[in-house]
Amino acid sequence: MTAGHQNRRAPRQGVTSSVGEALRSYLARTGFVERLNQAGVVDDWPAVVGDKIAAISQPESVTQDGTLFVRVKSAPWMQELQLLTPELLKRLRGSKIKRIVWRAW
C-alpha cells in the first residue's frame, strides 16, 4: 500500500446523510432551531402584527429566554400595544416568544 492510500477510509455502507439532514440534526441538538424561530419574528413582524402596527414599531432583538424587544414610535402607541400584548403573544406562539418589552423612541 502506498503512503497516499493509508489514510483513506472505506465508505460506510448503509449510512447516507445529506448535508441538509446533518445540518437539521445539528441545529436541533444545539437548540439553534428554537433560536432561529425566535429570530424569524423580526423578519415576519409585518405579517404578524399587520401594516398599521408595523408602521409604528420595529422589533430589535430576541433574547435566548424568548423576550422580544420592540421599539415603538411614541409613549401613547407603546401603551396601546401593551394592551394588545396578550393577543400578539398568541399570534407569536409558534416562534417561542414568551414576552414582549415595548420601548418608546
Image (cartoon, helix red, strand yellow):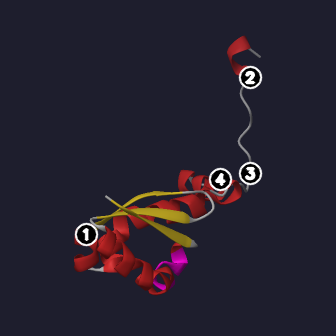
Q: Indicate whether 105 appears above or below 77.
A: above
Q: Earlier in the sequence, mark 1 or mark 4?
A: 4
The residue positioned 58% from the left and 61% from the top of the image is: 33
Find disc 4 in the rendering and name its residue. Answer: 26
Q: Amino acid at mark 1?
A: Ile
Is label 1 or label 4 in front?
1
Residue 97, visible in the rendered structure: no
Q: Amino acid at mark 2?
A: Asn
Residue 3 vertical position relative to residue 100 in the rendered view, above or below: above
Q: Quadrant of residue 31?
A: bottom right
- Depth check, mark 4 against mark 3: the one in front is 4
The outermost residue toward the top is 3
Of the two numbered discs 1 and 3 on the same chain, state the one appearing first in sequence.
3
- Between 7 and 73, the residue placed more toward the observer is 73
Secondary element under disc 2, as helix, strand or loop, is loop
Q: Look at the image and give the residue range highlighted in magenta.
A: 90-94
- The answer to whether residue 13 is magenta is no
Residue named by callout 2: 7
Compared across the picture, whether 49 is left or right of 38 comes to left
